[in-house]
Amino acid sequence: MVKNSFISIISREKKEKNSGSVEFQLFHFTSKIRRLTSHLELHKRDFLSQRSLRRILGKRQRLLTYLSKTNKVRYKKLMDQLNIRKKKTR
């Protein structure tokens, strides 16, 4: 449902369906993260899911830093679309 609408937004911008694009990957990771967090609210001791969540969070963070370094406009637009907070800097 939501995935298909986001794919259509990306495909309209690029005029072709590109599931390897950074935006699509970030959307896919974000939907997995939201699904896993709702699962972990019910099953607090599911350690395998916790590990999977940490791995996906790391992958998403690496992609976000890559996108912020390469294209700031696309990064800000995607952050607004996905309702993700900015990375805390040290």
Image: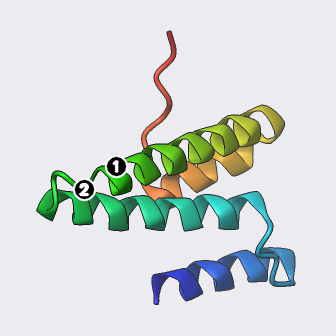
How far is the residue under mark 1 from the one under mark 2? 6 Å
Front residue of 51 and 41: 51
Type of amino acid under label 2: Asp
- Answer with left or right where residue 40 lies relative to residue 27: left
The one of 17 and 37 positioned closer to us in this rendering: 37
Badge 1 element: helix
Residue 44 location (% of width, % of height) = 15, 53
Residue at 45% in and 53% down: 52
**Is 86 on the left-hand or right-hand side of 39?**
right
Q: Which residue is mark 2?
A: 46
What x and y, as percent, mark residue 28? 57, 67
Task: Please give left or right for residue 67 compared with residue 86 in the image.
Answer: right
Taking the spot 68% from the left edge, 67% from the top edge, the residue there is 24
User: Given contact means CB atoms under 8 Å apart, are the residues at marks 1 and 2 in contact?
Assistant: yes
Q: Which mark is residue 50?
A: 1
Residue 26 place in picture, x, y as percent? 61, 58
Residue nearest the observer in this picture, 7 or 38: 38
- Residue 64 is marked as none
